Amino acid sequence: MLVGILPVLLEPAATKTGDAMNVIVSDEVRVLALQEDQEEKEIARWVAGDLEGELSGISGDTRCASVAVVGDVRVLYLDRLSF
């Protein structure tokens, strides 16, 4: 089911099981991975058109990174049943 385009507050997700994915609609997000020293390191930036959470959303595995918004991010949220 398509839920809609939402303003987003993305929370740390690196320990959550995937149950949905987001399509970045506007602005960008920073992709953060937890390092061995427990510090988060930016490993990528995603912009409008990029997908977030699709691999764990399909597999149901634990997410391996978190995202932090940069600006006024909006996403298209798709729950697992939608894809």
Image (cartoon, rainbow, N blue to C red):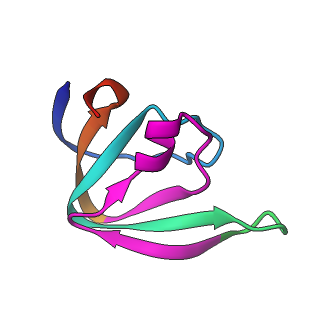
Give left or right: position of 65 versus 71: right
Residue 25 sits above or below residue 79 on the image: below
Question: Does the segment drawn in magenta span residue 60?
Answer: yes
Tell me what residue is drawn at x 62 percent, y 53 percent. 64
Task: Write down the quadrant of residue 5 in the picture.
Answer: top left
Task: Write down the quadrant of residue 62 in the picture.
Answer: top right
Residue 81 sits above or below residue 67 on the image: above
Residue situated in front as seen by the camera: 79 or 33: 79
Image location of residue 12, percent across then percent down: 56, 48
Tell me what residue is drawn at x 31 percent, y 47 percent. 22
Report how many numbered discs are placed on residues in the image: 0
Name the quarter where the N terminus is drawn.
top left
Give left or right: position of 28 versus 6: right
Residue situated in front as seen by the camera: 74 or 24: 24
Report the span colored magenta. Answer: 41-70
Question: Does the segment drawn in magenta span residue 76?
Answer: no
Tell me what residue is drawn at x 27 percent, y 36 percent. 78
Name the quarter where the C terminus is drawn.
top left
Give left or right: position of 60 versus 79: right
Q: Is residue 53 visible?
A: no
Residue 27 sits above or below residue 24 on the image: below
Image location of residue 60, percent across then percent down: 54, 33
Residue situated in front as seen by the camera: 35 or 11: 35
Image location of residue 54, percent across then percent down: 40, 47
Tell me what residue is drawn at x 48 percent, y 58 percent. 67
Image location of residue 13, percent across then percent down: 56, 45
